[in-house]
Amino acid sequence: MYLDENQINELFGFVLKFASSQNRFIFTFMERREDGKIDFKSTHSMVNFWLNWKKEKFRWGISQREMPNFLSDRKFLLEEIVAHNKLRSKYLSAFSNSEPLA
């Protein structure tokens, strides 16, 4: 989100260097849309206004379609991409399903 592509590559390189082959690396990412925009899927226009006002620019994102090759190029294997609704049902089932996570 706030890291650029070089910083992302450094992060993955660090994890590859210091983790064992049995470890799993869990991370989040912003999804790049087909138009190239990096954004939350169902964001309100006021969120975009606030982010622009604060000069908070999303600097890196990737589409789910590109993720397997991205990881493979960095010697990682994609096990699963999990969307917010699956995480919500698994870990937050006791809470309201209508409230946004962020």
Image (spheres, rainbow, N blue to C red):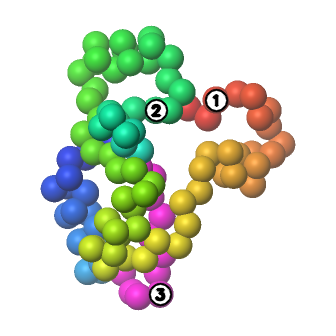
Mark 3 lies on a secondary structure that is loop
Q: In this view, does 45 lie to the left or right of 94?
A: left
| Secondary structure under the numbered disc 2 in the rendered image | loop
Task: Reply above or below: 10 against 96.
Answer: below
Marks 2 and 3 in Cβ contact (< 8 Å):
no
According to the image, label 3 marks what residue? 22
- Picture coordinates of residue 32, whole percent (x, y): 36, 42
Q: Please state the horizontal and vertical placement of residue 6, each as a whole percent of the image.
A: 16, 56
Q: Residue at x 45, y 55 (%)?
A: 64
Disc 1 marks which residue?
Answer: 100
Mark 1 or 2: the one toward you: 2
> Where is the C terminus found, in terms of image quarters?
top right
Q: Which of 35 and 76 is in front in this view?
A: 35
Query: Is residue 92 visible in this depiction of the protein?
Result: yes
The residue furthest bottom is 21
Mark 1 to mark 3: distance in Å?
34 Å
The answer to which of marks 1 and 3 sits earlier in the sequence is 3
Where in the figure is residue 7, as x and y percent of width and height?
Answer: 20, 55
Q: Mark 2 points at which residue?
A: 40
Q: In this view, does 57 lie to the left or right of 77?
A: left
Most extreme residue toward the front is 34
In whole angstroms, how far apart are the C-alphas of marks 2 and 3? 32 Å
Location of residue 66 with respect to 23 vertically, above or below: above
| Amino acid type of the residue that numbered disc 1 sits on in the rendered structure | Pro
**Magenta segment:** 19-29
Circle 2: residue type: Phe
* 74 sits left or right of 49 in the view: left
Camera-side residue of 92 and 62: 62
Who comes first in sequence, dot 1 or dot 2?
2
Choose top left, top right, bottom left or bottom right for residue 2.
top left
Which residue type carries mark 3?
Gln
Q: Distance between the residues labelled 1 and 2?
A: 12 Å
